[in-house]
Amino acid sequence: MVTIIHNANERGHADHGWLNSYHSFSFAGYRDPEKVHFGALRVLNDDTVAPGMGFGEHPHDNMEIISIVLKGSLEHKDSMGNSSVIRAGEVQVMSAGTGVTHSEFNPSKTEEVQFLQIWIFAKEKDIEPRYKQKTFDSSFRKNRLDFIAAPVDLDEAMWINQDAYIALGRYNRGINAIYKLKQKGNGVYVFVISGKITVAGKTLGERDAMGIWETDKISFIPATESEILLIEVPMI
């Protein structure tokens, strides 16, 4: 087993007033040659957008984009004709494929929106762009990991164009959990949304992360009530 720790306070940071963003990997004006990507995981941004503000129309291609809204709501419009609002408890998956433009906007006049945005390199190039959005009910991910995106039918997961598996879990203190990797040769990036967990013998706090590879399973124990994001990806 090989591990690498990315502490929350070592992430890239950009405060534009309307946008407060933390970057787990090199992004925009933040450059760190040691943190360009983790396997096929290219971007994990932790964004807070002020009321009435947002990202104007911009393009993507050959990238799998997953948005997880933690608080508030995020309005999405794209060149495929999709127009929707993603609220806390909802997840959006977009395969950019041959190319798509989209915008993201906080429609609230009073409340910030907090969301995680994940970019994963596509497996098949130049596919037809796709979009899906799903709400997960209140029983979702209690003392277990439930998949929100996967390349195959798995739990309630939405399809993704990569041999990657993305899961969320909420755990009570002291639960001894084991995750078995779905595909040989993949690695796992564990990101603590809230709380504190011990994984591979190391303690991770809120917004800390650990990359783990050359193993077929990992175990973790929450030291407090915790919420985690787990991203299994090919180690390209």
Image: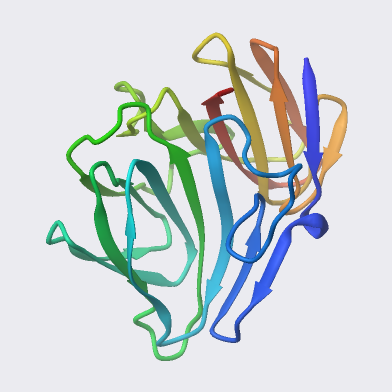
**Nearer to us in this view, 119 or 60:** 60
- The quarter in which the N terminus is drawn is top right
Colour approach in the figure? rainbow
Q: Is residue 71 visible?
A: yes
Residue sitting at 81 percent across and 56 percent down?
10
Residue 83, quarter of the rendered image: bottom left
- The quarter in which the C terminus is drawn is top right
Residue 217, quarter of the rendered image: top right
Q: Is residue 73 left or right of residue 10?
A: left
Point out residue 111 in the picture as x, y percentages from the top left corner: 48, 83
Vertical comparison of 141 with 9: above or below: above
**Nearer to us in this view, 171 or 119:** 119
Q: Is residue 93 left or right of residue 12?
A: left
Residue sitting at 46 percent across and 90 percent down?
110
Point out residue 214 in the picture as x, y percentages from the top left corner: 70, 13
Q: Is residue 198 visible?
A: no
**Nearer to us in this view, 29 or 81:** 29
Q: Is residue 144 left or right of residue 1?
A: left
Q: Is residue 60 left or right of residue 45?
A: left
Residue 212, quarter of the rendered image: top right
Vertical comparison of 171 with 92: above or below: above
Vertical comparison of 204 with 69: above or below: above
Point out residue 87 in the picture as x, y percentages from the top left corner: 37, 64
Question: How many numbered circles does the render carry?
Answer: 0
